[in-house]
Amino acid sequence: MDACNGVVHETDDDLKVQDFVKILSFANTAEKAVLAVKGLTDMSLDDVKGEQSTIDVWWMIHDGGFLILLSWLLTQHRNWRQSQIRVFTLAENVSEERAKSAGEVLSRTLRERRLFDVDVEVILADDAMIEPYTYDWTLRVEGRHHFLNSRGQRAAESIPLEIDDLFVVDELTAHVSPTHARSSRSTRSLESSGAACDVPSGSVVVSDLREEPDRCPRGHVMRRPQSTLPPLGDQRLLSQPDFSNLESCTRLNQVVLSRSSEAELVVLNLPQQWGTEVSQARAFMTYCNALTAGLKSVVFVHSSGHEVFDLSN
């Protein structure tokens, strides 16, 4: 955007960014899922990945089951068949103990669904670091539950879509008798130290990266089993993401880079864009680019909320 004689002129780049964000907005309105690839021109169709290659899934609150299943489907292709999938999920306002239990629930769920043994790292983050992914939590969860109820689907899905569902399952299974728990499929775990890449396959670790871990919760708080979702009220109109906080975005980027800089592919959530005006579109794209700076190839994913993952058969 250029300013000349007090008049603001939109550049070609501004228009391209705005057009892209309008496509995202249209897809969201039409209740369609979105996959957006960054670095597509550098992805060779003839390049077979080796056993040391990884597909790193970064689960930012929403769409976890969608991210994981897409990555698993990718490993069915000959080019990615030898690649290992690793899962990194971010949470806030929970203890390290609860975070580790939630990671074990995810690891056990994927194994019981006969998908794969997966390394899981649960990263405890500050509210500001993941605010663009939590501002619309109430709206998205309420919409998801309404859709499942309209189809007569059970609340607990084969693979959880929301990070909260891991904590719900963990609390529900905590009431199971110790004898029954011992007879269920075992879950390999590791003490909360070290990086996920340094531990055996199928392990679960927790990293507390909060600057103020003892501070009272301010942002999204993990819901409890069978709890009532907070009313939307005017939040639908008032709540909006803060894509201008690039300091927190840069911190999150450093967290991702420290673990996934060598990953052949990173699969992560696409934040919900707020508006399609040029300034809003530019802020959104600047955030996405800053978040993924330094990564080889990225697939951004945003579900429609109407996907059903039933792997019970």
Image (cartoon, rainbow, N blue to C red):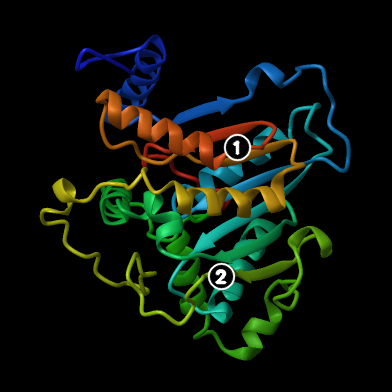
Q: Residue at x 36, y 17 (%)?
A: 14
Type of amino acid at the residue the image marks with label 1: Ala
Residue at numbered disc 1: 293
Residue in the image at 65% along x and 53% along y: 87
> Which residue, given by chain and number where applicable, does mark 2 sit on?
102
Q: Position of residue 114 (x, y in %)?
A: 70, 52
Could you say which disc has been placed on residue 45 in the image? none
Q: Nearer the viewer, residue 273 or 178?
A: 273
Asked if the residues shown at circle 1 and circle 2 are in contact, with their CB atoms under 8 angstroms apart, the answer is: no
Q: Is residue 236 left or right of residue 247?
A: left
Q: Is residue 19 above or below residue 233?
A: above
- Sequence-wise, which precedes: disc 1 or disc 2? 2
Circle 2 packing at 10 Å, graded few (<14), some (14-19), many (20+), is many
Q: Is residue 91 above or below residue 298?
A: below
Q: Is residue 181 above or below residue 281?
A: below
Counting from the top left corner in percent of width and height, residue 275 is at 25, 32
Specify whether 144 is left or right of 53: left
